[in-house]
Amino acid sequence: MIIPIELENSSAVKYNVVIDTLPTLTFNRKVAIITNTTVSALHLETLKSKIEADELFVVTIADGEEFKNLLTVENILNELFEHQLDRKSLLIALGGGVIGDMTGFTASLYQRGIGFVQVPTTLLAQVDASVGGKTGVNNAYGKNLIGAFYQPEAVYIDTEFLKTLPVREFSAGIAEIVKMAVMFDKAYFDFLMNADFQDKQMLEKAIERSVELKAEVVNLDEKESGIRAVLNYGHTFGHVVEYETAYKTYVHGEAVAIGMMMANALAVELDMMQQDEMDLVTTFLQKHNLPISYEIKDVDAFYDKFFLDKKTANNKLKFILPQGIGGHMIRDDISEEVLKKVLKAF
């Protein structure tokens, strides 16, 4: 299955998302694989066996969201300079969303920009993080606040990589899958409610539909000036949860699941979603062992952290909320009183 990315406002940018067994990749240039210690032990040799290149190098970094920062990017850059990569060289991201984000960001910086390819090894990265060109790192103020929109040359999605994925990480990817369905496609949500993700064909169908939906959005709005912001459903709340827990308590998809619960509660409060629709989403998240609750210790402090969100403009908070299941709305008119009422329920 090949899903094309053709950015409407940038005719020079076209690439494919390939969902299939990883093919042999031939490059007449220097190539550096960027990966982490965990993924390297599991999948590096498989990828290396599929690559034909003038020269092939490997840069391995520590595993964990806490290493997604400028210091790690600088360390990667230093290794690329040591290997004397040039402007025609290529980076390959082998790993989950953290590796993909940092590799893309590093590619955008190295000699003002070199190519990179995504080979995502987690479900979350396959259905979301690897597609669309968002790159970046975290800092002391929040998640992904430093970064760039920088598109890959290709994305190769092979579900064989998922066989070594821990159950918790697999569930985290399912959170990003259901996010797409709630925002855009009621029929897809109905399919997911009964899907067996252990079935290879059903899993590939779910990945395919998620990528198709994301491709449609990215093709229309690469820089998140409009509809692409809808892909952040659950993230505005979820990023605060991650920040408060120092990125150590929840993996990203789990924080998004909590964020969806909070967004859904706000949508119910605003009569944008029925309680029974919220209950369906809750049931789905529970079925896949995703967290649906979070204890907010200080509502005022939680609220204040919203203002670090990248979607905030002119001191107005933007929230991506469901309109039932299969619909969405971006709201920037929600009062502090209503927001805090919803937060107090957590």
Image: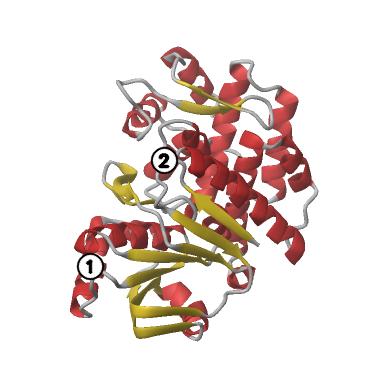
Tell me where residue 203 sits by quadrant.
bottom right
- Element under label 1? helix
Compute the Cα span from label 2 to label 1. Answer: 30 Å
| Label 2: few (<14), some (14–19) or many (≥20) C-alpha neighbours in 10 Å | few
Sequence-wise first label, 2 or 1 = 2
Relative horizontal placement of residue 96, taking residue 29 as reference (left or right): right
Give the residue at mark 1.
Answer: 77
Tell me where residue 260 sits by quadrant.
top right
Residue 64 vertical placement versus 53 (above, below): above
- Element under label 2? loop
Question: What is the three-letter code of the residue carrying label 1?
Answer: Leu
Type of colouring: secondary structure
| Label 1: few (<14), some (14–19) or many (≥20) C-alpha neighbours in 10 Å | many
Q: Residue at point 31% right, 57% down?
A: 105
- Can I make out residue 5 in this image? yes
Give the residue at mark 2.
Answer: 9
Residue 185 vertical placement versus 38 (above, below): above
> In the image, which disc is placed on residue 210?
none
Relative horizontal placement of residue 89, taking residue 155 as reference (left or right): left
As drawn, the residue found furthest toward the right would be: 194
Q: Position of residue 300 (x, y in %)?
A: 37, 24
* Number of numbered discs on residues: 2
Q: Residue at point 35% right, 35% down?
A: 310
Quarter containing the N terminus:
bottom right
Whether residues under marks 2 and 1 lie with C-beta atoms below 8 angstroms apart, the answer is no
